[in-house]
Amino acid sequence: MDPIAPRPADEVFLTAEEYEAVHAAVRTTAGSRGAGQTRTLNLLLEQWNEVVHEVDEGYGWSAPELSDDLACRTALARLWRLLPPRVRAIRQPELDEIDRRFHSTTVGWPGRNEQEGQWWLRRVPRRLEAETARRSAHGWHMGWDVMAFPKPEAVQIAD
């Protein structure tokens, strides 16, 4: 049996060294979350999942707030390469599924290469909630009018 291949979650036991390596990677790359709350790999994956759920339901905040919300995915990218190989193998399917959902519920920025790093920062939710019917010259509502390109047809705005 491949020592790195993941086993069902109820059979996975990390060694003390693996736990310490995961905690060290998180401390090194993700820091703490306001008021000194320590981040964990589980917390970052949960935050990423929650952001994707919110985007899928219809994102009601602004472009800068989405950028802030995506910080958990950026933190995951920084720490992922520092995780022990077996931990990455165990958790990769979970991250891949959340990424797949985000990709399917968002639209890529026009003219941007999806293969470059931090692809999640160059995507827009397919469904946006707006407080006002006012639109910018590019078709974005307030809070998204910072986007430097016209609103893609695939992006729907609900007033």
Image: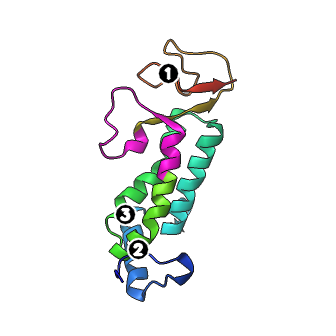
Q: Position of residue 155 (x, y in %)?
A: 55, 27
Q: Is residue 69 visible?
A: no
Q: Given the image, on which type of amino acid does mark 2 rest?
A: Val
Q: Position of residue 29 (x, y in %)?
A: 37, 63
Q: Which comes sooner in the sequence, label 2 or label 3? A: 3
Residue 96: which quarter of the image?
bottom left
Q: Residue at x 36, y 71 (%)?
A: 83
What's the mark number on residue 79?
A: 3
Pointer 2: what residue? 87
Which residues are the magenta region? 99-121
Residue 138 colored in magenta in the image: no
Q: CA distance from mark 2 to mark 3?
A: 12 Å
In the image, is residue 113 above or below residue 84? above
Secondary structure beneath dot 1 equals: loop
Q: Given the image, on which type of amino acid does mark 3 rest?
A: Leu
What's the mark number on residue 84?
A: none
Q: Please identify, in this view, whether the residue under mark 2 or under mark 3 is nearer the observer.
A: 2
Q: Callout 2: 10 Å neighbours few (<14), some, many (20+)?
A: some
Q: CA distance from mark 1 to mark 3?
A: 33 Å
Q: Residue at x 55, y 39 (%)?
A: 105
Secondary structure beneath dot 2 equals: helix
